[in-house]
Amino acid sequence: MIQFITRLATNEPHIRCRVGSGPLGPVAQALNQLAGLLETRRLSSVEKFGIEALVEQSQNMMLTADTAERIRFVNFTIPGLTYEQVLGRSITDFLLPEDHERCRAVFRKVIETGVPDSYDVRSYAETGPQWYVVRVGPIRDAGRIVGFTMITTDVTSLKTTQLQLEQTNRELEQSNRELESFASVASHDLQEPLRKIQSFGERLKTVTAGALPPEGQDYLERMQNAATRMRRLIEDLLAFARVTSKAQPFVRVELSTIAHEVVSDLEVAIDQAKATVTVGALPTIEGDPTQMRQLLQNLLSNALKFRSENTAPRISLEASVDKEAGRCELRVQDNGIGFEEKHADKIFNLFQRLHGRGKYEGTGLGLAICRKIAERHGGTIQARSVPGQGATFTIRLPVAQSVAARSSQS
């Protein structure tokens, strides 16, 4: 008995005494009545700090509805409507007409399966938040689903950002289509006049061989060189545009195979420069084979071009793989003329040249193409160099593309 009273005094009113037939029976019965009274008071107190308080103070609108989609409870209503004007009405009365079927499909699914679901919806009210995410869950009574709950969350800011992003993506797609259209025009309409200039220039050179004075021959040579440079520029612009407009789906790419094929393609240039090119073990990754070939060819060609005059070029292509991070690192290193470290970012911009055209040919697009290819594959490219001591280009790429990246290329 003393133990019971002690537990009762320490806020355990749910305990009960066993009522016997002895002289203490009435006392035990009285104590049980006291415990019941305390239990009632305790529950009343808990309710003030329980679910009801949470629902009343929640910033989220909470509703319940029966299987006929009639509203049975709401913690607060939309501006201008009383509880009496809301309770008992169909939920669809407070949805925009274009959202009726989509939202009702979610209600039916929850009622039929008992599995919670959600949807986003534009607000019915003209004031207040404009977008909500609504979480729908089942209400069960003795195992039978008798209705569903709805908890709304204001996502206006998030939805506005999403809509702006979608608009930006549409504009980007339009820009890409225009870029592809430009590429088509450039590949035909712009190159045709250049082909004629070069063709007629060659004819003029043949017809007037020995007849033109040195000054005239110099003019003709300059015209031919300008046409050749213009044609290369157009071809490089096309290559830059096609990184996205003519991109191929990602597949497994054996970089070692591609690297050796690139070295074979550059065999003449390598022999002329008396260069040594070494290729280490390279990984297999997911990527666009054509663009991986273009990336390696541009970097190796760059290393051959910017070589020191009195030193035989030594070029190496190596790689390392971080299996835990799922990324690989490719390094193209040379012993060429190098460049000032302050230009390390500038060299990847369009039309950027650190050296005069007279000594080193090119359009200033090769490294810009490399960066665009690396970025399309979810990677990066960086350069480190010391003047007169060569340069190292480092490309970091994911070994496997994400599902989102893979699907965006299909």
Image (spheres, grey):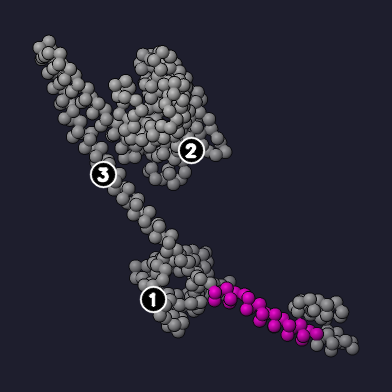
Instruction: Give me the residue at 37% from left, 21% from top.
Output: 305
Q: Which of pointers 3 and 2 lies earlier in the amino acid sequence? A: 3
Which label was assigned to residue 156? none
Task: Identify the image quadrant of residue 192.
Answer: top left
Query: Left or right of 316: which side holds 21?
Result: right
Which label was assigned to residue 93? 1
For discs 2 and 1, the disc positioned in front in the rendered view: 2
- Identified by mark 1, the residue type is Asp
Say which residue label 3 marks.
178
Q: x%, y% of residue 294?
A: 37, 29
- Identified by mark 3, the residue type is Glu
Say which residue label 2 marks.
398
Q: Secondary structure at mark 2?
A: strand
- Identified by mark 2, the residue type is Pro
Q: x%, y% of residue 131?
A: 41, 65
Predominant secondary structure, magenta span? helix
Q: Relative to the observer, which residue lies in front, 214 or 171?
A: 214
Query: Left or right of 8: which side holds 215?
Result: left
For discs 1 and 3, the disc positioned in front in the rendered view: 3
Q: x%, y% of residue 95?
A: 39, 72
Per the model, the C-alpha gap separating discs 1 and 3 is 45 Å
Is disc 2 in contact with disc 1, using a CB cutoff of under 8 Å?
A: no
Disc 1 crowd rating (10 Å Cα; few below 14, some 14-19, many 20+) is few
Per the model, the C-alpha gap separating discs 3 and 2 is 30 Å
- Magenta span of residues: 31-57
Instruction: Give me the residue at 23% from left, 28% from top.
Output: 230
Q: Is residue 385 visible?
A: yes
